[in-house]
Image: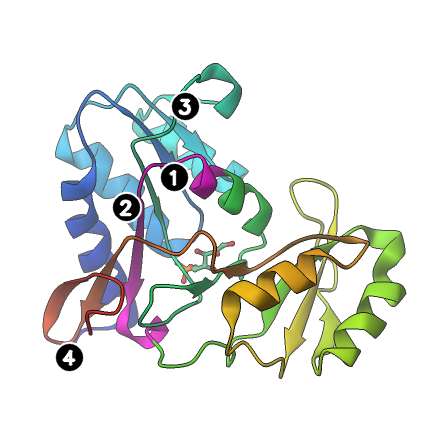
């Protein structure tokens, strides 16, 4: 029986096939992405450069010789964005931000032609919302935003001792109904003090590369 890490690694290795040579790409954050960075470096594929979404990914990229660029260096879009997820549904909408990099991840995803999500089978769900939804907030608006989130039916909890890359705080929200991901994504981002939330409805993945007990599956939105 494959472990969760083995399934993450399988998906990450397969995802290298989705990287075109001599293009710019985006690289997400997390343990599955770390396997991807290792697999990309090992593959010997040549890319022009990659935009990273966190210090952790940048450090591993530098260690393994993957050239980093910033979004500001580019005039066009990135060819592909590779990232993990905390949950992904059958339309390939996701909850992300377990690692706290959701804002950078959404920016880089929106700057990419194609989003390839890499995950193990435990992340693939029929309904989003078991995983607490990360909401990045301006720190001094915490109580105000928390009250609004309670009115949405969620139970927000401050991620203690955590500051995002952009100097903000995160509220992890349990119990909020995410049956309409795109609508809720917009509603939450309309609350003053919310910087970004971890629903990736507007920026759903185009392809899911899923590591499972039966091997790797490549899934398109609504296909399975
Ligand atoms: C970080 C993320 C990650 O993609 C998500 O948390 C999955 O992480 P892992 O690959 O370690 O399971 O959204 O902000």
Mark 4 highlights which residue? 1
Q: Is residue 75 above or below residue 111?
A: above
Identify the element where label 4 is drawn. loop
Which residue occupies 82% across, 64% down?
145
Report x, y in % for residue 19. Answer: 21, 36
Rendered image quadrant of residue 90: bottom left
Write down the quadrant of residue 16 in the picture. top left
Q: Residues within 10 Å of mark 1 (few under 14, many from 20)?
A: many
- On the image, the x and y values in percent for residue 171 come to 71, 65
Report whether the residue tagged 1 is closer than 8 Å to ligand 1.
no
> If you read the primary sequence from the N terminus, does the residue marked by circle 3 or circle 2 appear first?
2
Q: Residues within 10 Å of mark 3 (few under 14, many from 20)?
A: some
Q: Residue at x 51, y 73 (%)?
A: 180
- Are the residues tagged 4 and 3 within 8 Å (C-beta)? no
Q: Looking at the rendered structure, which numbered label has been put on residue 27?
A: 1
**Mark 3: which secondary structure?**
strand
- Residue found at x 51% / y 46%: 106
Q: CA distance from mark 1 to mark 3?
A: 10 Å
Q: Position of residue 150 (x, y in %)?
A: 78, 79
What number is the disc on residue 36?
Answer: 2
Q: Which residue is mark 3?
A: 68
Between the C-alphas of marks 4 and 1, the distance is 29 Å
- In the figure, 215 relative to 52: above or below? below
Q: Given contact means CB atoms under 8 Å apart, are the residues at marks 3 and 2 in contact? A: no
- Which region of the structure is painted magenta? 108-124
User: Looking at the image, do the residues carrying marks 1 and 2 touch, with CB atoms under 8 Å apart?
Assistant: yes
- Marks 4 and 2, how far apart in space? 21 Å
Q: CA distance from mark 4 to mark 3?
A: 36 Å
Q: Quadrant of the C terminus?
A: bottom left
């Amino acid at each position: 029986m494959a472990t969760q890490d083995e399934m993450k690694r399988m998906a990450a290795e397969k995802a290298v096939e989705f990287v075109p040579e001599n293009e710019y790409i985006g690289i997400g954050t997390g343990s599955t992405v770390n396997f991807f960075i290792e697999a990309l470096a090992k593959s010997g594929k040549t890319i022009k450069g990659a935009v990273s979404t966190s210090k952790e990914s940048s450090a591993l990229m530098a260690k393994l010789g993957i050239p980093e660029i910033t979004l500001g260096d580019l005039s066009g879009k990135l060819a592909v964005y590779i990232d993990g997820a905390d949950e992904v549904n059958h339309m390939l909408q996701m909850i992300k931000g377990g690692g706290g990099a959701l804002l950078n991840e959404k920016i880089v995803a929106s700057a990419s032609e194609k989003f390839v999500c890499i995950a193990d089978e435990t992340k693939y769900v029929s309904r989003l919302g078991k995983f607490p939804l990360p909401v990045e907030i301006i720190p001094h608006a915490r109580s105000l935003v928390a009250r609004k989130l309670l009115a949405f039916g969620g139970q927000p909890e401050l991620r203690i001792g955590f500051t995002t890359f952009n100097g903000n705080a995160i509220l992890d929200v349990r119990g909020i109904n995410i049956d309409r991901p795109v609508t809720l994504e917009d509603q939450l981002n309309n609350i003053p003090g919310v910087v970004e939330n971890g629903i990736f409805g507007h920026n759903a993945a185009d392809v899911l590369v899923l590591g499972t007990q039966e091997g790797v599956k490549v899934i398109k939105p609504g296909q399975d």
